Image: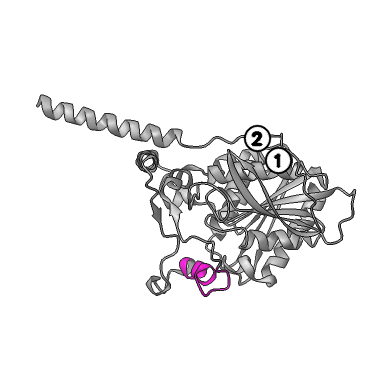
Amino acid sequence: MQIIGAIVITLLGLVGILALIGRVSVERLTISKQATPTNRTLKNGMNRVEYDSKGKTIVANLFIPEDYKDGEKRPAIIVAPAATAVKEHASGFYAEKFSKLGYITLAFDPRGIGESEGIEADCDPYHHANDVASSVTYLSSLAQVDSDKLMNVGVCAGAVSATYETFQDSRVKALGLVVPSIDGPERTRATFFLVRWVFYVLGGIFQTLRVFGINLKMPAIPPEDEIADDNHEMKDLANYYLEGKVGYHPRWVNGIGATSLVGVSTLSIFNYADQYDNIPVYVVSGENAYSLDPGMRFYNSLNGPKDSIVLEEATHGDFYWKDKYADQAVERIDSFFKKHA
């Protein structure tokens, strides 16, 4: 019995240590207001730029309006991408559209995504939120930017990182959310205490494996022929991201890093709705978007300046690339920003 007791205590201790590792792996948001201004000449149109985020190089596409004139200071927007998406996906699509309305805009690859440094397939929203903050710092350092008119826009899961960053960053004056996919904790059942701690334990295991060079990844989207007919969400995403589809990009990795699970499962922006009493928020979704319900529940929980629109017939994926819906989203958010920011 003593041996069994010792084994049980040892196992419990090991589980406790792993849970602690997983818990402390959650990255705190750091708002750094100091940035070294770029010494390169930026042209009107798209510019490939680089800057630091938590010691890693972020690669981004910076859009300066074609009608920009030297000496002007323009309002600016950072577009936070969907979880696995590269800057050439929907975030770049929206950044370019907002630029045509006169904003200086930025679409970036978060750490571990696309061209940016970091752990491959890092989809942790806490990490992405810090990358949003670093992007705000970079933009605010530019002579072309009116640092009193900085706004965040989050697309899909980018809504989580953009929302988490915005209320903690006084430099950001308003928030726009396009088909916000924000129910990670609900989907994983991590809203329950015990389930959440199971994810912390798993996070500790995955973090330990990474120390030994093992970076486990899970597929983000299964092969198209393996998607059930009634799985409208995966069909919608597959029709955009997979090879041969309209949104396919060779730098896109069809994977979610296992170390991202803690963040995906524990960062609930519903917990921060009361922080938006004085921050304007605009929400855009689609009538047939799988993300409609959580997005509108978050919208309804807000008490500050807000507005929303649900576009008829639009699916979640339609907003990634279809001008018919994206143009309406951009026009509505632009009007809202000009009124409130």
The reply to whether the magenta stretch includes residue 182 is no
Q: Residue 294 location, x and y as percent?
A: 54, 54
Amino acid type assigned to the residue bearing label 1 in the image: Thr
Q: Residue under circle 2? A: 31
Q: Residue 298 location, x and y as percent?
A: 59, 49
Looking at the image, which residue is at 74% across and 45% down? 139
What segment is highlighted magenta in the picture? 234-248
Rendered image coloring scheme = one colour
Q: Which mark is residue 42?
A: none
* Residue furthest to the left: 1
Residue 154 visible in image: yes
Secondary element at tag 2: loop
Secondary element at tag 1: helix
* Residue furthest to the front: 40
Crowd rating for badge 1 (residues with CA inside 10 Å; few <14, some 14–19, many 20+)? many
Between 108 and 302, the residue placed more toward the observer is 108
Between 201 and 302, the residue placed more toward the observer is 201
Q: Residue 336 location, x and y as percent?
A: 77, 54
Instruction: Indicate the quadrant containing the N terminus: top left, top right, bottom left or bottom right.
Output: top left
